[in-house]
Amino acid sequence: MRIPAMKHFVLPAALLSAGAMSEPARAQEAEPPSGTGASAASDGQALADQLANPVSSLISVPLQSNYDCCYGPAGGDRYTLNIQPVIPLGLSKDWNLITRTILPVISQEETVRGAGGDTGLGDTLQSFFLSPKAAKNGIVWGVGPAILWPTGKSTFTADKFGAGPTAVLLKQNRGLTYGFLANHIWSFAGKSSASSVSQTFMQPFITKTLPDSTSFALNTETSYDWKNKDWVVPVNLSVSHVVKFGKQPVSLGVGARYYPERARNGPEWGARFVMTLLFPE
């Protein structure tokens, strides 16, 4: 037995996350590596700033591990590893195309007593942002399509192909990044027996980066399911820091979240750990 209302939780919400982990306007062009001490700290801050900007020119591979508690009548736990490569492509001297992919790997305990748990892939979400290379007055923006691929296991899939618009607008100044990212997905193909998809995702975010590359981030990953008339509103608070393993820069972050608004049988609270591999030019 499964809870029908659980299916709409599987749709991957675009980005993310302190989720949103983005970058700064000045970081649209990667800085050359420097030495140790103050210079190394400055490089770390620049990388942390870049992570605060969803459409920066930094190649990164976030591995975002999420724990969410209390799904369904049985109060089951869910563990989700989001593999989220971000790849910028230079189209011309003035424009970049930023590709962001979210591939979830999900392990869920039983949500209804006696039903058992399950593990498998979720549906994949890809976003493509056309963005100018040069920021104007610290303002960065990007627009493009988002595509939903039904790659998930039967328990964790909408069984539909989907697409729609996505956009991000942000401002960066002296280590402070704030902005808004959104998308909307409509289904257009897939199993005829599966419910159609119409879902809006909204992510206001603010990140403060300190000179030592420590960042504090606050955001929501709000989604609205137009078919089921359900809001899901997790509020995320996180902290991260850029370190080096040998020559490899890595951002490590932890966070907590609370759901002031949730759909029927949805989670109540959660935690997050993020390791992001960084590949500056």
Image (tube, rainbow, N blue to C red):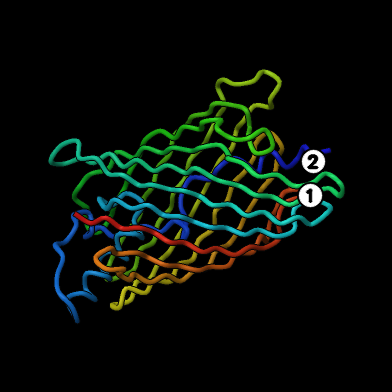
Q: Secondary structure at mark 1?
A: loop
Left/right placement of residue 98 relative to residue 26 reads: right
Left/right placement of residue 25 relative to residue 128 reads: left
Q: Secondary structure at mark 2?
A: loop
Please name the residue that numbered disc 2 is placed on: 3
Classify the position of the N terminus by image quarter: top right
Q: Residue at x 68, y 56 (%)?
A: 261
Residue 164, horizontal then vertical, whole percent: 47, 31
- If you read the primary sequence from the N terminus, does the residue marked by circle 2 or circle 1 appear first? 2
Q: Residue at x 83, y 44 (%)?
A: 115
Classify the position of the C terminus by image quarter: bottom left
Q: Residue at x 20, y 74 (%)?
A: 40
Residue 223, horizontal then vertical, whole percent: 59, 46
Please name the residue that numbered disc 1 is placed on: 111
Left/right placement of residue 155 relative to residue 250 reads: right
Image marks 2 and 1: residues in contact by CB distance under 8 Å: yes
236 over 195 or under it: above or below: below
| Image quadrant assignment for residue 144 | top left
Foreground pick, 260 / 154: 154
- For the residues marked 2 and 1, what is the alpha-carbon distance in whole angstroms? 8 Å
Residue 253, horizontal then vertical, whole percent: 45, 67
Mark 1 residue crowding within 10 angstroms, few (<14) / some (14–19) / many (20+): many
139 over 39 or under it: above or below: above
Q: Residue furthest top?
A: 192
| Amino acid residing under circle 1 | Thr
